[in-house]
Image: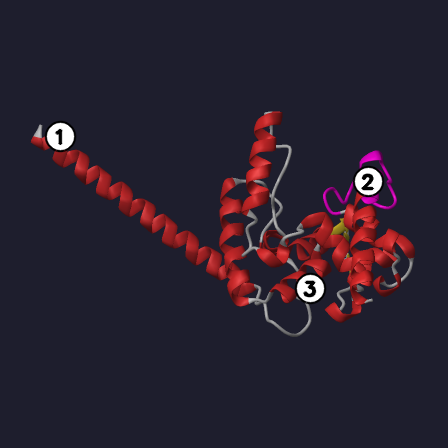
């Protein structure tokens, strides 16, 4: 009995050491990803790994980054409404949205809803590949935490608006405005801002060119909420 306990204890210790070493190696790997793509508070928006991979794969990508002050407030608000309404109130992970997504997925008995924040999506776009795996989600979580610690919310939002995918091979709000409406993002209307934001869940199949049923309904909801927010903001100034 004593021998069996000794063997079990030895095995447990080696398993613990193996897990610890694996975790250390993985954290070092994530740190290397962070170092390869330095994120500064000021300066040009860095090209994301997602855009770089697309450029390497087909030789081009529609991408034209712009400074945050060049992006109209209603475009920013439309994206926040569509993707992360509590962006300024969480630390990278929206626990309320996560609980709601878990409950909805249990009801539908499938992974129908996600709860990724803008910070998480920025981390994924900047550093990681589009593959779906628990390991990638773990890396995404570590990098999201790092972004929230070392980069301001405003900078994270600026990077996201300039690197998010808005269509097949279309990245960032400036490239999307030019691609869909042949104008700079600074000249987009409220309706166009809503349509831009409505492209984010499934940019390749639901966008201002495909105009499928999901896109039409989703953009309509965003537009109505955007009108309410803009009206309330205008009334507050009176």
Is residue 42 toward the left or the right of residue 166 in the image? left
On the image, the x and y values in percent for residue 120 come to 59, 52
Q: Which residue does the numbered mark 3 point to in the structure image?
A: 158
The residue sitting at 81% across, 52% down in the picture is 228
SS at badge 1: helix
Between marks 3 and 1 in the image, the one whose residue lies nearer the viewer: 3
In depth, the one of 121 and 62 nearer the eye is 121
Measure the alpha-carbon separation of dots 2 and 3: 24 Å
Measure the alpha-carbon separation of dots 1 and 2: 63 Å
In depth, the one of 143 and 218 nearer the eye is 218
On the image, the x and y values in percent for residue 214 come to 80, 36
Pointers 2 and 3 in contact (C-beta within 8 Å): no
The residue sitting at 47% across, 60% down in the picture is 31
- Mark 1 or 2, nearer chain start: 1
Magenta range is 200-220
Between marks 1 and 2 in the image, the one whose residue lies nearer the viewer: 2
Q: Which mark is residue 215?
A: 2
In depth, the one of 165 and 99 nearer the eye is 99
């Amino acid at each position: 009995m004593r021998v069996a306990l000794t063997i079990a204890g030895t095995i447990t210790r080696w398993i613990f050491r193996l897990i610890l070493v694996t975790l250390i190696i993985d954290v070092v790997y994530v740190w290397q990803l962070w170092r390869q793509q330095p994120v500064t508070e000021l300066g040009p928006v860095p090209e994301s790994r997602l855009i770089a991979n697309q450029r390497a794969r087909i030789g081009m990508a529609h991408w034209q980054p712009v400074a945050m002050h060049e992006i109209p407030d209603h475009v920013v608000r439309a994206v926040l409404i569509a993707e992360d309404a509590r962006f300024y109130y969480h630390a990278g992970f929206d626990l309320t949205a996560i609980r709601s997504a878990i409950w909805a997925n249990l009801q539908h008995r499938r992974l129908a809803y996600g709860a990724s924040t803008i910070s998480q999506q920025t981390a994924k776009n900047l550093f990681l590949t589009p593959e779906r795996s628990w390991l990638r989600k773990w890396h995404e979580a570590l990098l999201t935490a790092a972004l929230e610690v070392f980069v301001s919310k405003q900078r994270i939002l600026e990077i996201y608006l300039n690197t998010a995918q808005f269509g097949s091979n279309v990245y960032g709000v400036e490239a999307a405005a030019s691609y869909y409406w042949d104008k700079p993002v600074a000249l987009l209307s409220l309706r166009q801002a809503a349509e831009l934001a409505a492209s984010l869940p499934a940019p390749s199949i639901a966008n201002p060119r495909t105009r499928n049923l999901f896109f039409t309904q989703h953009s309509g909801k965003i537009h109505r909420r955007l009108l309410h927010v803009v009206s309330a903001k205008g009334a507050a100034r009176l």
